[in-house]
Amino acid sequence: KAGVTQTPRYLIKTRGQQVTLSCSPISGHRSVSWYQQTPGQGLQFLFEYFSETQRNKGNFPGRFSGRQFSNSRSEMNVSTLELGDSALYLCASSLAGQGLNTEAFFGQGTRLTVV
Amino acid sequence: AQSVSQHNHHVILSEAASLELGCNYSYGGTVNLFWYVQYPGQHLQLLLKYFSGDPLVKGIKGFEAEFIKSKFSFNLRKPSVQWSDTAEYFCAVSPWDNAGNMLTFGGGTRLMVKP
């Protein structure tokens, strides 16, 4: 079955702009989480959505937001981009919260470069 | 809040050598434990997981890990590494009592296996 799909794979944006990243989870998965991966800070949890509701939130500023649609697809938005937002953004889906304690499956990520 | 420490940032081994990567976590409650691997140019993949039961868990590709509750540790082991094990390894935890999927990752260990 198809894995987690993230689009686009690569993005270059200018400081001050905003960006939207997309994630399609594995079919049947209703939990979608987002992570930021940088060389300095490693992998950090941004937020998690389940059934169109944000269920958990990490310690990121309000410029980072997300949403989830009824088909479980999720988008992440970063407004007023800063150079420090350059990172690999990973999406993960899982069956967590559907009566199962299970692992997250990760996508290939979107590489965002802010110039 | 939970935290995860991986003591070895870089490890270099020759093929057939044994591997042990350390992972310690800090959290006031029960956790689920994971080891993920990221091969060069590929997405994060689950190596193994621990939710409950036998503290010695076996994963893919000959990897195993032991959960020692008294030491808050979940060390990864492999008796004989191969060149194809060259990758970055991440230990992660999530709160057992959180219905969602919210992973806290360690800083990662880069393993290089010399042929």
Image: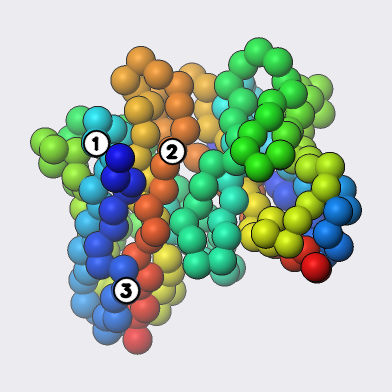
Judge whether A34 appears above or below B98 on screen: below
Residue A50 visible in the picture: no
**Which of the chains bears the disc numbered 2?**
A
Amino acid type of the residue that numbered disc 3 sits on in the rendered structure: Tyr
Which type of secondary structure does the marked residue at label 2 adopt? loop
Crowdedness of circle 3 by 10 Å Cα count: few (<14), some, many (20+)?
Answer: few
- Quadrant hosting residue A71: top left
Left or right side of B7 for A78: left
The residue beneath circle 3 is: A10
Judged from the image, the secondary structure of the residue bearing numbered disc 1 is loop
SS for dot 3: strand
For disc 2, the marked residue is A104
**Label whose residue precedes the other's in the sequence (3 or 2):** 3
> Residue shown at 35%/15% (left/top)?
A99
* Side of A16 relative to A3 (left or right): left
Looking at the rendered structure, which numbered label has been put on residue A27? 1
Discs 2, 1 touching: Cβ within 8 Å: no
Q: CA distance from mark 3 to mark 2?
A: 22 Å
**C-alpha separation, residue under disc 3 versus residue under disc 1:** 24 Å
Of the 4 image quadrants, the one containing the C terminus of chain A is bottom left
Q: Depth check: give the residue in front, B19 or A65.
A: B19
Parent chain of label 1:
A
